[in-house]
Amino acid sequence: MFAPLLLATLTLFSSCKEGPKKSEKTAAAAPPTEAAAAAGAPADTNTKVSYPPLDKALYDSLNKRMINGDTSGHWPVKKQPYPLPGAILPFKRIVAYYGNLYSKKMGILGELPPTEMLAKLKGEVKHWEKADPKTPVQPALHYICVVAQGDGGKDGKYRYRMPFKQIDSVLVLAKKINALVFLDVQVALSNIRAELPLLEPYLKKPNVHFGMDPEFSMKDGSKPGKKIGTYDADDVNYVSGYLADLVKKNSLPPKILIVHRFTKKMVTNTPNIKLRPEVQVVMDMDGWGEPELKAGTWRYFIHNEPVQFTGFKLFYKNDIKKAPNHMLTPEEVLKYKPQPNYIQYQ
């Protein structure tokens, strides 16, 4: 089985004006051939599932409670479509562990042995349940399945596609705690239109969702890690449209689309992002630093630029790099408005 060497950690920094510093990223070297990566790919089969009708009154009341007195005028999102039956948000709060199984430096998902990692995630779920007893908590594994790297590879795209067998192993881990799975993509010098369709067999599964990381979308041809990348609303709309088609063709519950953000230019033309009943879009505040910096990033790039649902990222190590900082607790995060629907730990 292919076991790539790991290159030096890629670290990006955003200015204090634009928000906290971003996470450390570690990339894999020398990607395997496409044939090797495809080995063990899931069967391309459809599973028809019926879901009870959506309780629209409950949906509205939960959205109102999520806003929790925000009088800024930014929330709630105007003209938000009701999702299809089987929607997860805002009926539950998702608490996810992020990372890659090849690296201990990319997040808690790969840092700990699987059994220990799952037990720790279950502990965080209990903490969130205690902090907000009215909102059920859904665990998730957020797995980086396409990783930006320092080596261009044979095609010069500076990204490594994880072998499908490793994605399968994440699905096995998720099943042990009834967790969702998010497949996260860092396109580097490739593009989202080339990478997303390769994951379709997995995205046809009801419990598998998608994440796109603008930080490593290097549209100007720069090597990943040298500067912060970008996506446009057009890219987000392509992904949501693709996911919506999968939902309709395969009778799936709505997909959740995570879009990471910690600067303004990471996602351009956000008012043009289209909302669809088949896809629930989460703008995830993906920056690390002291609480004041995180609060500023949330205010300018999440609260003041509403899309649909919101996410908040917490870093076990990077949030406490500068003494006497601490990683925000669930109780502290719940003070943000709107209250985040999706929580990610790295």
Image: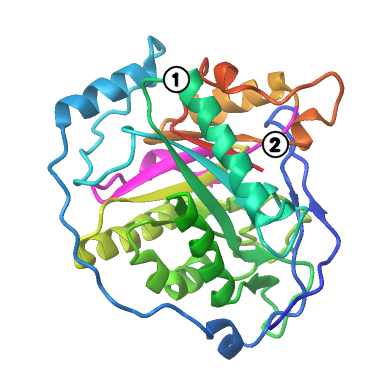
Task: Report the side of 26 relative to 244 (left or right).
Answer: right
Percent of width and height locating residue 202 = 41, 68
The N terminus is located in which quarter?
bottom right
The residue to which callout 2 is attached is: 315
Please tell me how many numbered marks the rendered image carries: 2
Q: CA distance from mark 1 to mark 2?
A: 21 Å
Residue type beneath disc 1: Asp
What is the number of the mark on residue 132?
Answer: 1
| The magenta segment | 267-289
Tell me the residue at 42%/77% (across/down). Answer: 42
Q: Quadrant of residue 306?
A: top left
The C terminus is located in which quarter?
top right
| Residue 214 lies in the magenta stretch | no
Task: Report the side of 175 relative to 3 (left or right).
Answer: left
Name the residue furthest left. 53
- Residue 312 appears in the figure: no
